[in-house]
Amino acid sequence: MSTMLSQLLSAPTAKDYQPCAMATLVTPVGELQLNANAYGLSHVTVMGSSRTEILLRHTSEAEYARANEHIEQAKAQLSQYFSGDLTQFNLSLAPKGTEFQRQVWQALIAVDYGQCCSYADIAERIARPKAVRAVGAANGANPIAVIVPCHRIIGKNGQLTGYAYGLDMKQQLLMLESTSKGAHFTLE
């Protein structure tokens, strides 16, 4: 298991989680929308999905500048990831979620590049072995695609399971990460 460079940061108030900056990035899996607040990246979603309908809050120029800095760092690292030059993100992340969701998302960050595990594995990692369905729901609610790698979670039987942006994108991401390993993932 890798050292967790990406950390989920807490904003002081619920309002502070609301993003105040947005940009897009064209990638091999589609155009991504990146949103951030002053504390870190709050969303990475696929353009055209219902998940990109995110309201931006008005904020000070200083907060906007910090949020935009988080977006620029994410764009640079995502570009390196898609070119095969980056296997671990080092970004400030500040998504809004329940304490349980944030535990699951932090456990997802610990799943190494090119590796996969199941919802049950994540439930074990957060010391909640009976919470497999809740882990699945938290995984599905992950607002930061690719960087918080929910695409690395597959069925216990080794087959691909649901993904918010479709199994084709999930398979593309897994194949990008496993090219040197020669892994093959099957669709459920």
Image (cartoon, rainbow, N blue to C red):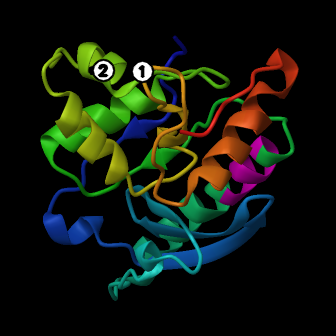
Horizontal side of 51 relative to 177 (left or right) equals left
The kind of secondary structure element at disc 2 is helix
Give me the residue at 35% from left, 50% from top: 140
Q: Which mark is residue 120?
A: 2
Horizontal side of 9 relative to 186 (left or right) equals left
Query: Can you say whether 5 is above or below 187 in the image?
Result: above
Residues at marks 2 and 1 touching, judged by CB atoms closer than 8 Å = yes
Give me the residue at 80% from left, 58% from top: 28
Q: Find out whether residue 1 is within the magenta segment.
A: no
Query: Can you say whether 74 is above or below 183 in the image?
Result: below
Tell me which label, 2 or 1, sits earlier in the chain.
2
Horizontal side of 143 relative to 128 (left or right) equals right
Q: Find out whether residue 76 is within the magenta segment.
A: yes
Name which residue type carries label 2. Ala
Q: Quadrant of residue 143?
A: bottom left
Name which residue type carries label 1. Lys
Query: Can you say whether 155 is above or below 48 in the image?
Result: above
- Say which of 144 and 6 sits in front: 144
User: Which span of residues is magenta-colored?
Assistant: 75-81
The residue pinned by badge 1 equals 156
Outermost residue, bottom direction? Answer: 58
Label 2 packing within 10 angstroms: few (<14), some (14-19), many (20+): some
Give me the residue at 38% from left, 57% from top: 39
Give the main secondary structure, helix, strand or loop, of the magenta stretch: helix
Query: Could one spot residue 59 in this view of the protein?
Result: yes
Outermost residue, front direction? Answer: 188
